[in-house]
């Protein structure tokens, strides 16, 4: 029998003497292969002792002011015989009363990874304030420069057009083609011909920027310091390798249909107000980025905003954004202006920015944002004033990343990346490990390869056990949530299947066409999956392959040729340097230039399968650029095939055993460890352990 100690915020709580605490553990459950699990206990009760009443602030008495907030989990720790066993969080579920007197509290312990969705909540990618460091001008010169910037840069311009009008009429420059024979003006012919009167090609305003996926991931710990990832799969130190799937993977910064801004708004140019300087460490502006970050320790901040300018004629608008979305808008302003708390509202936790829209350049002698409120931590009132002096609202469109990034929850983004590459995650709990407290992110195969082995034969109960069928599904589907762009829709209509999707119903290795009553399981990524198009020279005097160009592009409209938006689009960027197929770039509708270097979008990491055959399809599709099926390293094959084949193998069994594990094994057993029973090796599917008695109910998978 072990002795169990439980701590909440480093305060030890009292337990009932006969309370049985069971902890469930699972990382990759055969019954739900796309879901990441965490440890948790069943709900148990603790006595309403003086100590516990103090910790939970007599929660049963709802008249207490500033009482215990049960809406949030609090840090907790479980010790066995005074040695740390698990760290995580406690959730107060409620209380029990007997004869109208408090008797007990009901609580649940959660493993540390469960805090990830709690910390992120419903926050969207626009809340990642660190992305503002990549803001840049949105004009012809910058778009062209980023179209030629070598892939691997934080922000590039891919050859993806979006300039449909939104009324069913496609912008003449938006649909691209290549014709070296016929040179009509005012359309998307990418064939370059020098001289005046030949203004055709890709119009700069039909293009948008894209940001590296790894830069989005890197921004998460900056905004949420409690979340720190190890660099096993994430971060530049690992991503720099050419074979890593995150290398050169981008998200298109497409937040609204069609072009970046409607034509009617093109004359109003947004400028982010920066230069406020630093404030207190808990809040304050990030110098040079204009980001006001308020934490939960500073609720209901009162504020005033004053803008001073000697320009009394030019009109401007003031927009305040919260986590990348519009919070307040004040339009049609001229001259110096002041806003009160009544107009601005009391500020809550989040990241705020101020944007000024103007038709002409306006110089502000100063912009002053004054804040005051009540500090929950210090229990005192406080006040801060931020001043940006000699600020100029320019007449150049500024592309603010956090306002242009797709409208997606951060937790959904991370879940999508985890599902895409079949990643697993857990918090490093060994205090001696250099990564202690961080979330370790690995591919599932790498996770299992790092496990240890324990022989538990002597601890197994021989009274009862079960050997069951392991196959929980008759079919597993892998797909994207959206494949709604023109070519992907045409593919589905012609082929009768979703572009890039895989339906695994078995293969030559494990058999197929299973007739059991099992359901179908679907792994679905929350992204757009687009089919791209390699252009050929429409000059019919040429013969293939001479008419093939080095140009591949994406036409981002639906099958009605209308402006389109759905899920965020991710793709691999590839830099093409080709003197044989330069493209015509329209700096304006009456000026063009020749580009011999440009970035194309791709579903494969390389254009040569001999170099790298990894791609973003689950199914082995015909590659859009090479028109062959040599890009065999699909998401399914690389990340899921081995695991799924094991699930479907006829020799696979799900064995249920009971064991009485000693403390030395309970302390050290991890979900990637192998256990041996009578010379047979098993993977752990799930394990439920009574921490007091050591009794463990185990679901095991025989090692094939």
Image: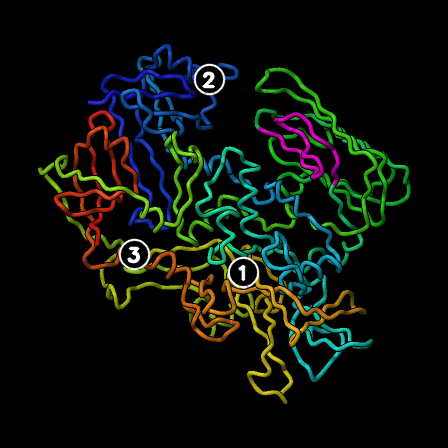
**Residue occupying the point 47% across, 35% down:** 118
Query: From this viewpoint, which residue is outermost toward the bottom?
Result: 541
Residue 295: % across, % down: 59, 29
Q: Earlier in the sequence, mark 2 or mark 3?
A: 2
Quarter of the image for the C terminus: give it. Answer: bottom left
In the structure shown, which secondary structural element does the residue marked by tag 1 occupy? strand
- The picture quadrant where one finds residue 670 is top left
Query: Nearer the observer, disc 2 or disc 3?
Result: 3
Q: Relative to 268, is 378 above or below?
A: above
Location of mark 1 (residue): 572
Label 1 neighbour load within 10 Å: few <14, some 14-19, many 20+: many
**Residue occupying the point 42% across, 52% down:** 419
Q: Relative to 578, is 542 above or below?
A: below
- Gap between marks 2 and 1, in whole Å? 55 Å
| Magenta-colored segment: predominant secondary structure | loop
Location of mark 2 (residue): 62
Q: How is the image coloured?
A: rainbow
- Gap between marks 3 and 1, in whole Å? 34 Å
Location of mark 3 (residue): 519
**Residue occupying the point 75% across, 77% down:** 193
The answer to whether one can see residue 523 in this image is yes
Q: Which residues are magenta?
A: 273-295
In the depicted view, which residue is nearer to us: 402 or 302? Answer: 402
- The picture quadrant where one finds residue 177 is bottom right
Label 2 neighbour load within 10 Å: few <14, some 14-19, many 20+: few
Quarter of the image for the N terminus: give it. Answer: top left
Magenta-colored stretch includes residue 442: no
- Gap between marks 2 and 3, in whole Å? 47 Å
């Amino acid at each position: 029998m072990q002795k169990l100690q439980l701590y909440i915020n480093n305060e030890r709580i009292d337990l009932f003497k006969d309370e049985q605490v069971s902890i469930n553990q699972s990382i990759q459950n055969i019954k739900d292969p796309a879901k990441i699990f965490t440890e948790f206990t069943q709900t148990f009760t603790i006595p309403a002792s003086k100590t516990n009443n103090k910790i939970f602030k007599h929660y049963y008495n709802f008249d207490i002011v500033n009482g215990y907030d049960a809406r949030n989990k609090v840090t907790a720790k479980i010790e066995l015989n005074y040695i740390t066993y698990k760290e995580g969080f406690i959730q107060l579920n409620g209380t029990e009363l007997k004869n109208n007197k408090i008797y007990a509290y009901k609580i649940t312990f959660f493993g540390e990874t469960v805090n990830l969705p709690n910390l992120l909540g419903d926050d969207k990618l626009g809340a990642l304030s660190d992305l503002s460091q990549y803001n840049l001008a949105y004009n012809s010169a910058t778009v062209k420069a980023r179209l030629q910037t070598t892939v691997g840069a934080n922000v590039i311009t891919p050859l993806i057009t979006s300039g449909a009008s939104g009324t069913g009429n496609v912008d003449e420059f938006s649909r691209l083609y290549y014709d070296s024979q016929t040179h009509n003006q005012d359309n998307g012919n990418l064939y370059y011909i020098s001289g005046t009167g030949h203004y055709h090609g890709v119009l700069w305003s039909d293009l948008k920027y894209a940001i590296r996926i790894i830069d989005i991931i890197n921004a998460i710990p900056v905004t949420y310091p409690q979340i720190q990832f190890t660099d096993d799969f994430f971060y530049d130190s690992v991503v720099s390798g050419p074979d890593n799937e995150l290398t050169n993977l981008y998200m298109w910064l497409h937040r609204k249909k069609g072009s970046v801004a409607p034509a009617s708004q093109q004359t109003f140019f947004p400028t982010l107000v920066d230069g406020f300087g630093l404030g207190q460490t808990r809040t304050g502006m990030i110098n040079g980025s204009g980001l006001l970050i308020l934490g939960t320790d500073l609720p209901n901040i009162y504020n005033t905003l004053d803008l001073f300018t000697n320009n009394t004629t030019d009109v401007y608008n003031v927009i305040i954004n919260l986590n990348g979305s519009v919070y307040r808008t004040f339009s049609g302003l001229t001259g110096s202006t002041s806003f009160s708390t009544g107009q601005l509202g009391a500020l809550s936790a989040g990241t705020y920015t101020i944007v000024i829209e103007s038709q002409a350049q306006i110089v502000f002698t100063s912009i002053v944002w004054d804040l005051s409120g009540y500090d929950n931590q210090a229990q005192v009132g406080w006040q801060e004033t931020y001043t940006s002096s000699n600020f100029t609202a320019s007449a150049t469109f500024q592309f603010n990343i956090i306002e242009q990034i797709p409208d997606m929850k951060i937790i959904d983004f991370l879940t999508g990346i985890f599902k895409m590459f079949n990643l697993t995650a857990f918090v490093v709990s060994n205090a001696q490990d250099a990564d202690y407290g961080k979330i370790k992110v690995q591919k599932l195969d790498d996770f299992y390869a790092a496990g240890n082995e324990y022989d538990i034969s002597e601890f197994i109960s021989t009274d009862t056990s079960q050997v069951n069928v392991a196959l929980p599904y008759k079919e597993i589907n892998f797909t994207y949530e959206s494949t709604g762009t023109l070519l992907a829709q045409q593919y589905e209509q012609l082929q009768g299947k979703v572009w890039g999707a895989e339906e695994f119903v078995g293969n030559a290795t494990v058999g197929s066409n299973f007739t059991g009553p099992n359901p179908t399981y679907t792994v679905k990524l929350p992204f757009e999956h687009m089919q791209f198009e390699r252009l050929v020279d429409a000059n019919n005097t040429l013969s293939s392959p001479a008419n093939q160009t080095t140009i591949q592009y994406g036409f981002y409209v639906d099958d009605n040729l209308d402006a389109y938006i759905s899920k965020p689009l991710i793709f691999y960027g590839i830099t093409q340097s080709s003197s044989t197929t330069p493209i015509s770039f329209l700096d304006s509708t009456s000026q063009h230039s020749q580009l011999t270097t440009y970035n194309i979008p791709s579903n494969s990491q390389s254009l040569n399968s001999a170099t790298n055959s990894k791609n973003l399809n689950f199914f082995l599709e015909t590659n859009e650029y090479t028109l062959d099926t040599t890009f065999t390293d699909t998401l399914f094959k690389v990340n899921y095939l081995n695991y799924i084949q094991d699930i479907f193998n006829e020799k696979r069994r799900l064995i249920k055993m009971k064991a009485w594990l000693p403390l030395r094994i309970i302390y050290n057993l991890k979900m990637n460890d192998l256990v041996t029973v009578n010379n047979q090796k098993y993977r752990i599917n799930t394990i439920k352990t009574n921490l007091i008695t050591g009794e463990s109910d185990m679901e095991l998978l025989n090692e094939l």
